[in-house]
Amino acid sequence: MIERVIATDAALALVAQLQARHGADIFFYQAGGCCEGSHPMCCAPGDLTLNAGDVQLGRVGGASFHVSRSQCEYLLGMQLTLDVRAGSQGSYSLEDPEGVHFVSLTRLWTDEEWQTLAAQPAPR
């Protein structure tokens, strides 16, 4: 099975650190927008309400990763890699006080991966 969302070692280490501090049920929401306006937010339960229009693309380090349905349609053509960069974004994302922020890097699927993905269940 091909994962639609994967993570670097640095991102997985930060996820584990945040889970130890905020609980195992933290989750990600990929903000809409474009380019730099589109970044993953790490939230604790109650920080952000997911609704029926949100789709879970996958899991990273045990944390679910969600996007809006319209964003999902756009992202289906690529794999996301969750990574970490230095610097605060001034957001309410859980990692912000650490002086770092999560980023999503994208890679287009190969023809072979497209064939495999066609046989997998679509994100819901």
Image (spheres, grey):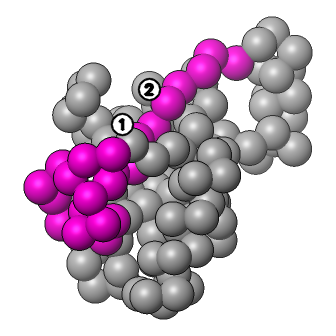
Q: Where the N terminus falls, by quadrant? A: top right
Residue 79's label in the rendered image is: none
Q: Residue at x 45, y 69 (%)?
A: 27
Residue 10 screen position, x and y as percent: 58, 53
Residue 36 visible in image: yes
**Residues at marks 1 and 2 touching, judged by CB atoms closer than 8 Å:** yes
Q: Which residues are magenta?
A: 86-109
Does the magenta portion include 94? yes
Q: CA distance from mark 1 to mark 2?
A: 7 Å
> What amino acid type is highlighted by mark number 2?
Tyr
The residue where tag 2 is placed is 74
Looking at the rendered structure, the secondary structure element under dot 2 is: helix
Residue 51 horizontal side relative to residue 91, left or right: right
Q: Residue at x 59, y 64 (%)?
A: 13
Residue 124 screen position, x and y as percent: 57, 54
Does the magenta portion include 64? no
> Farthest top residue?
111
The residue where tag 1 is placed is 70
The residue nearer to you, when weighing 90 against 73, is: 90
